[in-house]
Amino acid sequence: MSNFKGKAVIVTGAAMGLGLAAAEALASKGADLTLVDYNAEALEKAKAELSSKYPESKFITVTADVSVEENVKNYVDETVKAFGKVDGLYNNAGIEGKQAPLIDYDINVFKKKINLVKTD
């Protein structure tokens, strides 16, 4: 079934995990995709795999940090440039942080995860 044929969709965190799985599901339905991730090497590998498996879909990649507004504007602009529109967004990118009981959790990591403050 190609119910996404002709639709342009942005997938963030597309280089691996849930983002890559979502990109594959969308490509299998005919979507044209902008694959976004901060890991350029993994992103290109994902694009190559998807392009090979789903030649009817078009793919572009944009390396970006989704927590930086200018990067977000850029991947939206690149999508419009490539496909003429944006029909959908799977906003999957995120950070995991460490696994720890709340009492032991680093407050700076916690704040970054919930975007109260930027910590670099």
Image (cartoon, grey):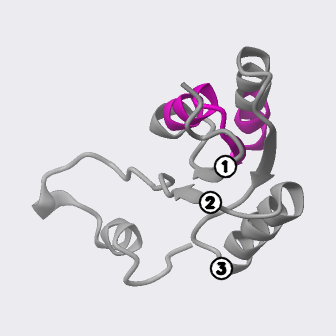
Disc nearer the start of the sequence (1/3): 1
Q: Is residue 40 magenta?
A: yes
Distance (Cα) linking label 3 and label 2: 20 Å
Q: Tell me the CA gap for discs 1 and 3.
A: 24 Å
Q: Amino acid at mark 2?
A: Asp
Query: Which disc, if any, is residue 7?
Result: 1
Circle 1 SS class: loop
* Mark 3 surroundings: few (<14), some (14-19) or many (≥20) residues within 10 A: few
Q: Residue at x 83, y 62 (%)?
A: 84
* Mark 2 lies on residue: 87
24 drawn magenta = yes
The percent position of residue 31, horizontal first and vertical second, equals 66, 40
Residue 9 location in percent, x, y?
A: 63, 51
Q: Is 106 placed left or right of 86 in the picture? A: left
With 34 as the anchor, is 21 left or right in this view? left
**Mark positioned earlier in the residue sequence (2 or 1):** 1
- The magenta segment is 21-45
Pinpoint residue 112: horizontal percent, then vertical percent: 41, 71
Residue named by callout 3: 69
**Number of dots carrying numbers:** 3
Q: Amino acid at mark 1?
A: Lys
Looking at the picture, tell me which residue is in the foreground, 51 or 20.
51
